[in-house]
Amino acid sequence: MASFTLQGIPVSRGIAIGRAHLLRPAALDVQHYLVAQEQVEAEVLRLQDAIARVHKDLQALWSDLPQDAPTELGAFIDVHALILSDPMLSEAPLDIIRTRHYNAEWALVTQIDELSAQFDEIEDDYLRERKADIQQVAERVLKVMTGTANTVPRSDGIDERSANMIVVARDISPADMMQFRDVAFTGFVTDEGGQNSHTAIVSRSLGIPAVVGMGNASRLIEQDDWLIIDSDAGVVIVAPTTLVLDQYRERQLLLQKARKKLTKLRKTPSITQDGVEITLLANIELPQDAAAALEAGANGVGLFRSEFLFMERSGQEHQLPSEEQQFDAYRMAVTAMKGRPVTIRTLDVGADKPLDSTEHNVLNPALGLRAIRYCLAEPQLFLTQLRAILRASAFGPVKLLIPMMAHGFEIDQTLAMIEQAKASLAAEGKKFDADIAVGAMIEIPAAALSLPMFVKKLDFLSIGTNDLIQYTLAIDRADHEVAHLYDDLHPAILQLLYMVISAGQKADIPVSICGGMAGDIRLTRLLIGMGFRELSMPAALLPEIKQEILNTRMEALQIPVRKILRSYDAAVIRETLASMKASAPVLH
Ligand code: PEP
Ligand code: MG
């Protein structure tokens, strides 16, 4: 196969080399995982049992047919029974389980894909249309299996095999992404998504190379194709030649070495050359991520995106985590951070993080009932979460962060609910930090334009640049068609950021940035030059940002930063930013 290159939007760093693992969309959407050698026969049996069950179901359907049923119906069932007995469907997937170690559902779907492709080639209309029958039979088998699918261990003994697989999909929902966390895939490629879509965020926090917004990669790339992801360039090379593969392997090695070198900075405080300390915090999605945050040398957690706890699906039926389950998760993060502050953001669902798939039908999810709006509309759910977070605050420093606030009454209602949660815990004699700091995400332009409302009532602010850019520039952060308009250097964004930090300084309350801009090394000097002293980012990016700070002299930033903030000319802004970088001394 000839090699070709696809271009997309880079969302994380590094190089990944591996084989394509295609995820199927929609109707035959199933879990994909590899089973350990000793579980292969059990997996084969699971598929055989499901096929036998469907045989029985078809027989029962046949015998229950009413006398006056149209004859086509009986013939239809016969065709399905025949398809089910055909070795192409009853045996080939078993071979796939045995040879490739795919889980049963994946093996079946892989085989259906192959059959479907063969059917597409058939000239005869009637025969070609039998493809739909095959898919329906497969769906029946899958339906029988999904009830038991989750009982199969998903990550035992599979790391080596999955370690060089690259997931290729039309799109990966944040919920599915959470499932991939358990399996060490080496990269992600998606047709859709933007730089700060939540799928991109998770891949960044996993430190895994990814390219999104590729348009039609999932149609051009085939199962098991060799791929190279050059995520810094946003490029995917399909079926590379040996020469190219070797070059990239070498580059990969060099990058790994450079990264390893940076880990030496773990305990070095992040202070500029002229003595200004910058607090570097980590963004986490699950309590387990706290380990990587510590490993990277984070001063704490600046953003715990708690909604990801609500997205881990246990089975088909969606279940919200109870107060106890949430408490356990928050406490785990708090204790893991060993006395460093943990900023827990309350549930931020909606838009590209739906709690269940039906939410996709909402008219305009990004402008809909999301985040704090959702929580205030579901007070019981919100109170449960507030109680769990408060209880965790008895185990170490915790801050409460509220997403998507825009209105004064939202602040008042939220603070009242926090008081209510505190009172209920006090009445039960449960411990919590009565003085817990409460802050707001500034991520809606309206909030940035009405800061006095916020600084008066809250203890700190944290800027969510991902949404702030989305709402200010009116571009969907997950839509690759408008990704080129996503511009963090747009004067409007820089002005808003400056307004927020200035208001925070005036009111003497801390302001951090926890959106993507905080982890973008191109912007580090600009942000600290503007006055930001707290940046929160994916742990994987933290060491290089620290190195940048160690290389910076704050004094040298004043004039160029002022020039950038006064300019409304994109070229001047970019040139000045580049000059800030070039003039910096290099640390050896
Ligand atoms: C943001 O909007 O910048 C942010 C940090 O929150 P999230 O990416 O989870 O929306
Ligand atoms: Mg946000």
Image: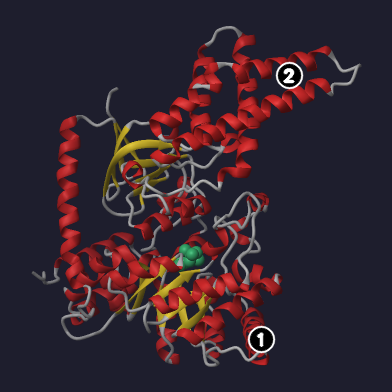
Between 201 and 326, the one nearer to me in the picture:
326
Residue 7 versus residue 384 in the image, above or below: above
Give the percent coordinates (x, y) of residue 377: 71, 70
How many residues crowd around disc 1 within 10 Å: few (fewer than 14), some, or many (20 or more)? few
The residue most toward the right is: 68
Three-letter residue code for mark 1: Ala
Q: Is residue 183 left or right of residue 118?
A: left
Does the beta carbon of the residue at mark 1 sit less than 8 Å from ligand 2?
no
Quadrant for residue 354, please give it.
bottom right
Residue 136 versus residue 21 in the image, above or below: above
Residue sitting at x 19%, y 72%: 265
Between 318 and 493, the one nearer to me in the picture:
318
Quadrant in which the C terminus is drawn: bottom left
Counting residues from the N terminus, which is met first, the one under dot 1 or under dot 2?
A: 2
The residue most toward the left is: 588
Q: Which mark is residue 566?
A: none
Between 447 and 209, the one nearer to me in the picture:
209
Give the percent coordinates (x, y) of residue 408: 63, 82
Give the percent coordinates (x, y) of residue 532: 34, 79
Q: Which mark is residue 77?
A: 2
| Element on which disc 1 rests | helix
Quadrant for residue 259, please give it.
bottom left
Does the beta carbon of the residue at mark 2 sit less than 8 Å from ligand 1?
no
Residue at mark 1 = 416
